[in-house]
Image (cartoon, coloured by chain):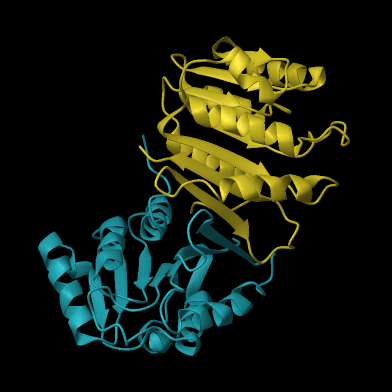
Chain colours: A cyan, B yellow
Amino acid sequence: MTSLFTSPVAVSHWWLKEFLAPGMVAVDATAGNGYDTALLAERVGPSGRVFAFDIQQEALEETKKRLVKLGLADRVRLIAAGHERLLEYIQSPINAMVFNLGYRPRGDKTIITRPETTIEALKAGMTLLVPNGLIVMTVYVGHPGGAEEWTSLERFIAGLPTEEWRVVKLRFINRPEHAPFNIGLQKIG
Amino acid sequence: MTSLFTSPVAVSHWWLKEFLAPGMVAVDATAGNGYDTALLAERVGPSGRVFAFDIQQEALEETKKRLVKLGLADRVRLIAAGHERLLEYIQSPINAMVFNLGYRPRGDKTIITRPETTIEALKAGMTLLVPNGLIVMTVYVGHPGGAEEWTSLERFIAGLPTEEWRVVKLRFINRPEHAPFNIGLQKIG
């Protein structure tokens, strides 16, 4: 039987799998170790396109390695820039975008996503998103700076107009307050 | 493109559809107008079994009518009793259970689900649930008695042991505080 709620990352992947289809264009705002990038690349198929951002060279190398191993590198463009610069690199419509906030697992824990740049990237993604398009975020509040990032982010997304955006938060209510959780934004079509 | 987060009832149906498979046994704790019962019956197939509870004769008639129309009545047992009496009617394992709390749409708005009986039914369902089994609830807090019901329910489910239960809450964070939301409980297998 299907395990629906294993972990926040699993929930994020579940939602993306449910949504993505061959030929779509997707953005990984935080390539990290490349797990999300690989999922996007697999789901959009050979006719689709994925853009993956990271400011850490190591992250991009790790992602590249994973994609090559899976035979998915062709359809992915790796971009060595902060995700807040999205619109410098992409001007055409996108179907989906994923964020995995905080620091890179097994990487430098002092390099974290930050409220201003996260929100700037999110806003940029929202402008490119097609009707019914999906943005999925895994949010971490347990590390230094995490709670502040979520406070800013929440203020922005909780204020989005109901008639234009569906904004959901899924959290594990029998886990500690600072446990990671999921955000889903869908543009009403 | 798939609309993932249309409404709490749609989310509940999405989760159930994702989880249910032919041959399963499912319980509708609140038959109401029969929409959930019909979904369960459809998904468990002719080899599956559905039990649907309601204390209102009108609700059971409405549900029956819907099931007959869809050719699904054979696999469903309608039970004219409060869901807190679950164990009087079912003693064998169940795969899934659904609750749609509050009052019956288009019915008598003074007849509502209540904290003690809701929790008793939930506990009964949990004892019958197989490993990896799923319980899905749509919770309403906008009607008189709704907030009290949720307070009691939350106290119980937020205290469930993390190593035995995954308990999630999905809410629309850009809608009013009193908007309905979803609860998912999955027994760790």
Spot occupied by residue B31 in the image (x, y as percentages of width and height): 69, 26
Q: Identify the residue shown where x is 42% and y is 42%.
A: B164
Spot occupied by residue B115 in the image (x, y as percentages of width and height): 73, 39
Q: Is residue B119 left or right of residue A83?
A: right
Q: Is residue B25 left or right of residue A80?
A: right
Please state, as top left, top right, bottom left or bottom right, where the C terminus of chain B lies in the image.
top left
Q: Residue furthest top?
A: B74
- The answer to whether any part of residue B33 appears in the image is yes
Q: Nearer the viewer, residue A64 or A75?
A: A64
Q: Identify the residue shown where x is 63% and y is 78%.
A: A155
- The answer to whether any part of residue B71 appears in the image is no
- Indicate whether B138 appears above or below A134: above
Q: Identify the residue shown where x is 74% and y is 18%.
A: B60
Q: Residue furthest left?
A: A69
Q: Nearer the viewer, residue B85 or B133?
A: B85
Q: Quadrant of residue A86?
A: bottom left
Q: Identify the residue shown where x is 39% and y is 52%.
A: A14
- Indicate whether B110 appears above or below B6: above
- Indicate whether A36 appears above or below B106: below
- Indicate whether A133 appears above or below A172: below
Total marks shown come to 0
Spot occupied by residue A136 in the image (x, y as percentages of width and height): 45, 65
Spot occupied by residue A71 in the image (x, y as percentages of width and height): 13, 62
Q: Nearer the viewer, residue A169 or A105?
A: A105
